[in-house]
Image (tube, grey):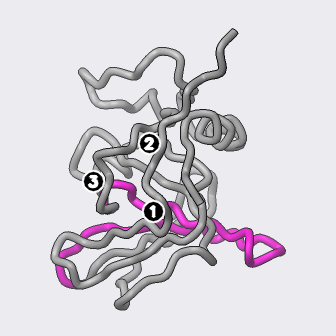
Amino acid sequence: MPAEEKTELPILPWRGGCQCGALRYEITGKPLTLYACHCTECQHQSASAYGLSLWVREATVHLAGKPAQWTRDTDSGHLMHCFFCPDCGSRLYHKGSEEPADPRQAILSIKAGSLDHARLLTPVGHIWTRSKAAGTLIPEGKPTFEAEPENYNGLVAAFARAYEIPD
């Protein structure tokens, strides 16, 4: 059986920012996964059918400018810290309230639509599909979850199978 062909993405660092350009960021480490979230929170914050979440290690993200922050409760009973541009309101990333024992393992969920090359990315999976917008099609063969996955290992593995990021 032939090996599955990987999509090659741009060489790191990746750059992105808010709509008005007041905040810019750079990602210097390889992302862990990219998925579409169909929860009602992502629908509201993106004013669209879903949000794209790109998981990266926090230590590999370098931000120019100071974002504003809003914190909300999650269905799991934890807190979600949401960071956005204080000028234009564009959401840039999320961070959970649970801190790992090793700070190098901390993860940010970059709102992937804010990347300069967002058009090159296809999510490897879909979560919270029970609240997806009417008419939204979920591609066959992708990992899907009706709600929050128990863990994200399958989405991380799917990203590693689908994408190659040159060093």
Q: Does residue 97 belong to the magenta stretch?
A: yes
Question: Foreground mark, 1 or 2?
Answer: 1
**Res. 19 in view:** yes
Q: Position of residue 110 (x, y in %)?
A: 45, 62
Q: Position of residue 164 (x, y in %)?
A: 56, 44
The three-letter amino acid code for the residue at tag 1 is: Ile
Please tell me the numbered disc located at residue 143: none
Residue 144 appears left or right of 50: right
Residue plotted at (83% across, 74% down): 101
Instruction: Say if mark 2 contacts mark 3, CB within 8 Å.
Output: no
**Res. 79 in view:** no
Q: Does residue 149 belong to the magenta stretch?
A: no
Q: Determine whether the residue tagged by mark 1 lies in a helix, strand or loop.
A: strand
Mark with earlier residue (2, 3): 2
Mark with earlier residue (1, 2): 2
- Above or below, 24 relative to 122: below
Residue nearer the viewer, 69 or 72:
69
Residue 135 appears left or right of 76: left
List the residue tagged with mark 2. Answer: 37
Residue plotted at (69% across, 69% down): 98
List the residue tagged with mark 1. Answer: 110
**Which quadrant is home to the C terminus?**
bottom right
**Which quadrant is home to the N terminus?**
top right
Chain part drawn in magenta: 87-114
Please tell me the numbered disc located at residue 46: 3
- Above or below, 121 relative to 137: below
Give the spatial CA distance, label 1 vs label 3: 13 Å
The three-letter amino acid code for the residue at tag 2 is: Cys
